[in-house]
């Protein structure tokens, strides 16, 4: 751990609910920053034609500290610390040192910053959750800020993360973060990769491993295949894959370790979907979250310009706003009609099976941005193998997704008990997370109150599982076409399969009349349904190996 990280760790007391402890920690920070400025000697005059050379390592350490102070001035849940950090930055600027400023417009490229930050101001429960998270992590990351629209979910999410990454468990701490990096890198999610690179180093991970997967131990390299299949085609996972990992002589994984591994992989594949789906920006103190350059005169930020995606963008652009003006009412009417049909007649088992197969086949064909080549940067792709493996060639070759009937293998009846047996208590936490996302409702749709949204939530969840070949015998898949229009289906498919291709225009184009909090709720549903689908296939393969 560098001396700089030691300094930042001494700031833990900023997360204390006791104001005098926070005040003392703030004094330390003030002294540390000013001491470093003095160590650097005279500040060069920017107007001078030949400014004296400065020690780069001193200046980069100071910059890292200032970036951290900037983050605290914007994200610390305590107002007294935010104010003191703002004053400290002003003081630093007054002595002639250039200070950083945030890049981008808040935690998300898609959702106005004011709307996200308003939540904790109005809701004491959220404020308390943010304080708890800050005390444990020393930061409030942008994912948590956006999830703050849904406090009940966020509380469980943070508890699950804490258990998975920091509490006693089968895997060592640095391995957990490294597996998180491998999983996030599969979708080129630099936000999550950077988050876990920092945490990996902080818990004593070997920096050499970060040069590429080939530098990591053989045991971790062996997870490459599992990572790849789970992220893109989990139905292909067999007990043979499991056996190869459990019987690799000195590089073998134990069953308990493997459960921990698959939970981490599936969580970070699906969290990458959420990160892209909500347009999460880099955290203020990380690369890409701040700059030391003065603001440009034009005042716009390059990251505000949505990156176009050819065919997809056109498809969304062609939908006129006028035709969407009554979309909420139309959707509510469809829900009402479907409910009435339920009460009158039920389709036969054969018809239900046919509708599922039709929906599954169609979900392979919905246009997604597959034609757009998306080459991962070396920076991210070094954390995994076989970058070309994805969905791209998978419907072109007419590959068939087999059907997994929930009656034969489900989370409730099979997966839950397996996880709980091999990783005590964690099955319970995961189950709560799935339940909260699935059952979360405020009985509203846009401006309408008192609406039962269960039918819509079930359609979204079951559509995602249908894309993975998972079938509920008692569900009429004809409802999906009634409730989810083509544009929304394309959004869901892109989110679940190639989330790195989500753009602001795609986010804006589905459910235009709905609130941002409702769209974030949709993204939570997508994330949890995807995680559960991947997890089911992994746990089924482990169960088959065990029997």
Image: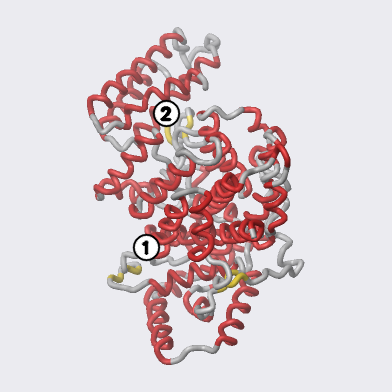
Front position among marks 2 and 1: 1
Q: Which residue is mark 2?
A: 68
Residue 34 image offset from top left, x and y in percent: 37, 14
When the figure is inspected, residue 298 is found, relative to residue 503, above or below; the finding is above
Residue 12 image offset from top left, x and y in percent: 36, 27
Quadrant where the image shows the C terminus: bottom right
Q: Which residue is mark 1?
A: 440
Residue that appears at 62% across and 56% down? 542
Compare residues 333 and 162 and report the one nearer the observer: 162
Compare residues 285 and 106 and report the one nearer the observer: 285
Compare residues 445 and 309 and report the one nearer the observer: 445
When the figure is inspected, residue 443 is found, relative to residue 425, above or below; the finding is below
Under circle 1, the secondary element is loop
How many residues crowd around disc 2 within 10 Å: few (fewer than 14), some, or many (20 or more)?
A: some
Q: Residue 508: which numbered mark, if any? A: none
Residue that appears at 62% across and 79% down? 358
Compare residues 411 and 48 and report the one nearer the observer: 411
């Amino acid at each position: 751990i560098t001396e700089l990280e030691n300094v930042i760790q001494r700031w833990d007391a900023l997360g204390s609910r006791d104001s005098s402890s926070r005040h003392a920690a703030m004094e330390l920070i003030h002294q540390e920053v000013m001491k470093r400025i003095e160590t650097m000697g005279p500040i060069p005059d920017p107007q001078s034609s030949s400014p004296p050379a400065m020690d780069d390592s001193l200046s980069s350490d100071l910059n890292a500290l200032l970036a951290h102070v900037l983050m605290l001035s914007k994200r610390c849940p305590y107002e007294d610390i935010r104010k003191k950090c703002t004053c400290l930055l002003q003081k630093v600027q007054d002595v002639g040192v250039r200070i950083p400023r945030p890049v981008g417009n808040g935690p998300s490229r898609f959702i106005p910053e004011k709307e996200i930050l308003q939540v904790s101001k109005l809701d004491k429960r959220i404020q308390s959750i943010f304080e708890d998270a800050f005390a444990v992590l020393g930061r409030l990351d942008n994912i948590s800020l956006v999830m703050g629209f849904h406090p009940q979910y966020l509380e469980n999410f943070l508890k699950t993360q804490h258990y998975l990454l920091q509490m006693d468990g089968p895997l060592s701490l640095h391995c957990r973060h490294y597996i998180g990096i491998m999983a996030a890198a599969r979708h080129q999610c630099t936000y999550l990769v950077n988050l876990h690179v920092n945490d990996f180093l902080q818990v004593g991970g070997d920096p050499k491993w970060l040069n590429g997967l080939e530098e990591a131990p053989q045991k971790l390299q062996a997870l490459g295949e599992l990572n790849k299949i789970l992220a893109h085609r989990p139905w292909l996972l067999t007990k043979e894959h499991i056996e190869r990992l459990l019987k690799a002589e000195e590089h073998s994984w134990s069953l308990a370790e493997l459960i921990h591994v698959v939970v981490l992989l599936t969580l970070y594949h699906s969290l990458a979907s959420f990160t892209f789906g909500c347009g999460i920006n880099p955290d203020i103190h990380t690369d890409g979250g701040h700059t030391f350059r003065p603001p440009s005169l034009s005042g716009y930020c390059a990251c505000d310009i949505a990156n176009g995606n050819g065919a997809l963008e056109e498809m969304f652009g062609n939908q006129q706003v006028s035709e969407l003006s009554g979309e909420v009412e139309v959707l509510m009417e469809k829900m009402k009609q479907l409910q009435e049909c339920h009460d009158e007649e039920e389709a036969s088992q054969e018809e239900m099976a046919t509708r599922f197969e039709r929906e599954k086949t169609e979900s392979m064909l919905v246009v997604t941005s597959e034609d757009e080549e998306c080459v991962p940067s070396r920076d991210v792709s070094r954390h995994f193998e076989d970058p070309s493996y994805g969905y791209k060639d998978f419907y072109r070759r007419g590959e068939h997704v087999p059907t997994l009937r929930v009656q034969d293998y489900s989370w409730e009846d099979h997966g839950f008990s397996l996880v709980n047996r091999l990783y005590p208590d964690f099955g319970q936490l995961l189950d709560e997370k799935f339940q909260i996302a699935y059952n979360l409702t405020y009985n509203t749709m846009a401006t309408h109150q008192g609406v039962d949204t269960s039918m819509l939530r079930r359609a979204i969840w079951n559509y995602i599982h249908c894309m993975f070949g998972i079938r509920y015998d008692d569900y009429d898949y004809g409802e999906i076409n009634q409730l989810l229009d083509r544009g929304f289906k394309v959004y869901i498919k892109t989110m679940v399969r190639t989330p790195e291709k989500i753009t602001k225009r795609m986010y804006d184009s589905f459910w235009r009349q709905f609130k941002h909090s409702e769209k974030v709720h949709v993204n939570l549903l997508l994330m949890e349904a995807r995680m559960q689908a991947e997890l089911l296939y992994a746990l089924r393969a482990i169960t088959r190996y065990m029997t």
